[in-house]
Image (cartoon, helix red, strand yellow):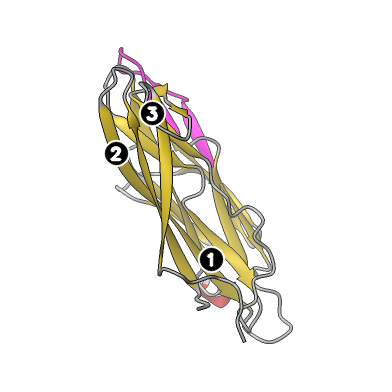
Amino acid sequence: MSVDSVVLTYTISGKRLGGEAFSRTTTQSFAKAREGVVGDNAKTLTLTSASPIFRKNRAGVLSPTSIVITANGQNLTQAGSFTASDSVTLTSVTEDSSGGSATVTSANFVDGMTVTYTADSADGSISDTVTLNQLDEGSGNITALLSNEAHVLPASNAGVVSSYVGSGTTISVFEGATALDYDATGTTAGHWDVSVTQSPPRSRLGYEP
């Protein structure tokens, strides 16, 4: 079955630095951006962050001092807009038909906040979102991060995806601010493994006539 959106759920299991077992889940979503009229180019939008994390040291200081969020749009005709959750104020904001950029400072940052860029209604109001997280040195919290939480795939009016470029993701797992290692088994201290399920099951984003 061919569909217009799919969600992948990653189940990450492993052992902490001290050997205790853990399990976490996180999701990645995909959606098609179809051409509005046969022959038109599909409109796409990708949002990336210079880093997905602020690190808090034992003295309570966050680093880096700021993170830049960049929106890259293709075939858009109007400027879109940035918004942030938790009433966070974005700085150095630029918005145009190619996308734009915005900055989250450590002073304004809220753990788990999201930044979204939404295209103009003339461009279908397509959007992309990134999440910024805080890692605390010495906390022992397990945090699983994806470098690409959501991706819009360009598609023809008939639903044929023209490119999957940039749709992959990198999974990172931390205990506090210490990165744990992937080893495909997750049975020894400081290591993890991952399994993936898809919703809806047994479907694909390709085209079936």
Identity, as a three-letter code, of the amino acid under mark 1 = Ala
**Element under disc 2:** strand
Tell me, yes or no, if residue 124 can be seen here.
yes
Q: Pointer 3: what residue? A: 174
Q: Which mark is residue 119?
A: 1
**Element under disc 3:** strand
Q: Position of residue 65 (x, y in %)?
A: 46, 26
Q: Position of residue 3 (x, y in %)?
A: 50, 76
Q: Quadrant of the C terminus?
A: bottom right
Q: Is residue 58 magenta?
A: yes
In the image, is 67 to the left or to the right of 187?
right
Picture residue at 61% right of the left edge, 56% below the top? 99
Identity, as a three-letter code, of the amino acid under mark 3 = Phe
- Nearer to us of marks 2 and 3 is 2
Tell me, yes or no, if residue 78 can be seen here.
no
Does the CB distance between marks 3 and 1 fall below 8 Å?
A: no
Q: Pointer 2: what residue? A: 23
Q: Residues within 10 Å of mark 1 (few under 14, many from 20)?
A: many
Q: Residues within 10 Å of mark 3 (few under 14, many from 20)?
A: some
- Nearer to us of marks 2 and 1 is 2
Picture residue at 55% right of the left edge, 63% below the top? 152
In the image, is 146 to the left or to the right of 136?
right
Instruction: Identify the mark nearer the N-term, 2 or 1.
Output: 2
Q: Position of residue 163 (x, y in %)?
A: 68, 64
**Element under disc 1:** loop
